[in-house]
Image (spheres, rainbow, N blue to C red):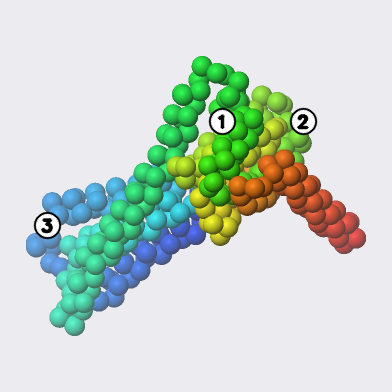
């Protein structure tokens, strides 16, 4: 359901913001607890400027990632790696002001270890980010291949239309490979169109479509099935992985911070999704009918829950 909140992109990353500040506080507490101030004469201003710049730049990278990316695996790994690196750099900066006794020599040792761990985590995050971009680029190449045939591309979302999705599903079945198909439906999108207008609804669908593609693998296919519904084709995947992919897509839709105007509060929505296996002998028509019926059942359950909550509030 659409709701308005006075929030920014950071509202989805409160946990990581707390983790960042807690890490800085821990590093500062350890240094101040076990260290003794150095004489002013031996403090190196050049080292302070250099190491302080690294700390500030790392904080800047953390803020940039949190401000520009939706929650997800890549974002989490990037922030975790940066925070580990920040912990080491904060200790390194503070030891320019403090001298540790021999009993706290372990504190100097742990300056380097978190930085190394952070670099390993960031390397994994950058690799996953690379795969994410490859998936987006593949979708763009597919659009270019069919650019001359505009009927294959949806004008609003720039995704393929439902007919193309059905043809790819049929081709996958004919090849003898198995997979999963999914339908994702945005909750109460008609209400959004009524309140903000069709032009804003089209702009919102375009943003959602980009996030859907970002959360797919390179070999997956996303299409606009009809209206506010998106169809996914997930070839060569087991049920658990298919459910995880669809779960990540739904979560990304829930975190879309859409703004009707620059100075208005962000608008958030949610989505429901159904997933079904696809085998060589399955009828696509029957599979689609089952998926659409499951969507209607999910909508009916959501509606009943909403009515119950409303009745409870009225009774109260």
Does the residue at mark 3 contact the one at mark 2 (Cβ under 8 Å)? no
Lower position in the chain sequence, tag 3 or tag 2: 3
Neighbour class for label 1 at 10 Å: few (<14), some, many (≥20)?
A: many
Q: Residue at x 41, y 64 (%)?
A: 22
Front residue (pair 224, 17): 224
Q: Residue furthest bottom?
A: 103
Q: Dot 3 corresponds to which residue? A: 44
Q: Is residue 39 left or right of residue 144?
A: left
Q: Which residue is drawn at the image coordinates 21% and 65% (left, top)? A: 112
> Secondary structure beneath disc 1?
loop
In the rendered image, the vertical position of residue 48 relative to residue 219, given as above or below:
below
Q: Which residue is mark 1?
A: 159
Q: Residue furthest left?
A: 41
The tag earlier along the polypeptide, 3 or 1, is 3
Q: Looking at this rendering, what residue extends furthest in the top direction?
A: 148
> In this orientation, which residue lies closer to the viewer: 233 or 106?
233
Q: CA distance from mark 3 to mark 2?
A: 64 Å
Q: Which residue has dot 2 on it?
A: 194
Gap between marks 3 and 1 measured at Cα: 57 Å
Relative image position of residue 131 (x, y in whole percent): 39, 45
Question: What crowding class fits label 3: few (fewer than 14 Cα within 10 Å), some (14-19), or many (20 or more)?
Answer: few
Q: Is residue 288 visible?
A: no
Q: Looking at the picture, does residue 88 appear above or below residue 127?
A: below
Residue at left offset 66%, top offset 44%:
183
Disc 1 versus disc 2: nearer the observer: 1
Q: Quadrant of the C terminus?
A: bottom right
Q: CA distance from mark 1 to mark 2?
A: 24 Å
């Amino acid at each position: 359901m659409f709701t308005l909140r006075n929030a920014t992109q950071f509202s989805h990353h409160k946990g990581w913001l707390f983790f960042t500040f807690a890490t800085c506080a821990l590093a500062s507490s350890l240094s101040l607890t076990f260290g003794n101030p150095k004489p002013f004469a031996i403090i190196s201003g050049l080292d302070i400027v250099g190491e302080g710049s690294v700390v500030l730049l790392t904080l800047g990278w953390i803020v940039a990632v949190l401000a520009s990316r939706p929650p997800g695996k890549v974002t989490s790994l990037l922030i975790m790696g940066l925070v580990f690196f920040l912990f080491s750099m904060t200790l390194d900066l503070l030891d320019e002001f403090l001298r540790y006794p021999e009993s706290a020599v372990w504190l100097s040792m742990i300056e380097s270890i978190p930085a190394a761990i952070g670099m390993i985590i960031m390397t994994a995050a950058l690799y996953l980010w690379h795969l994410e971009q490859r998936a987006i680029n593949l979708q763009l190449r597919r659009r270019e291949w069919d650019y001359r045939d505009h009927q294959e591309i949806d004008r609003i979302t720039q995704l393929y239309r439902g007919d193309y999705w059905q043809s790819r599903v049929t081709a996958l079945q004919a090849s003898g490979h198995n997979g999963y198909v999914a339908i994702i439906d945005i909750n109460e999108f008609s209400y959004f169109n009524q309140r903000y207008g069709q032009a804003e609804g089209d702009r919102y669908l375009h943003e959602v479509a980009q996030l859907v593609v970002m959360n797919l693998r390179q070999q997956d296919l996303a299409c606009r099935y009809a209206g506010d519904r998106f169809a996914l084709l997930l070839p060569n995947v087991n049920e658990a992985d298919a459910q995880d992919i669809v779960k990540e897509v739904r979560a990304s839709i829930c975190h879309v911070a859409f703004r009707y105007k620059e100075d208005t509060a962000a608008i958030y929505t949610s989505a429901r999704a159904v997933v079904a296996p696809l085998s060589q002998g399955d009828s696509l028509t029957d599979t689609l009918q089952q998926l659409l019926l499951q969507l209607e059942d999910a909508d009916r359950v959501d509606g009943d829950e909403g009515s119950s909550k409303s009745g409870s509030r009225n009774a109260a």
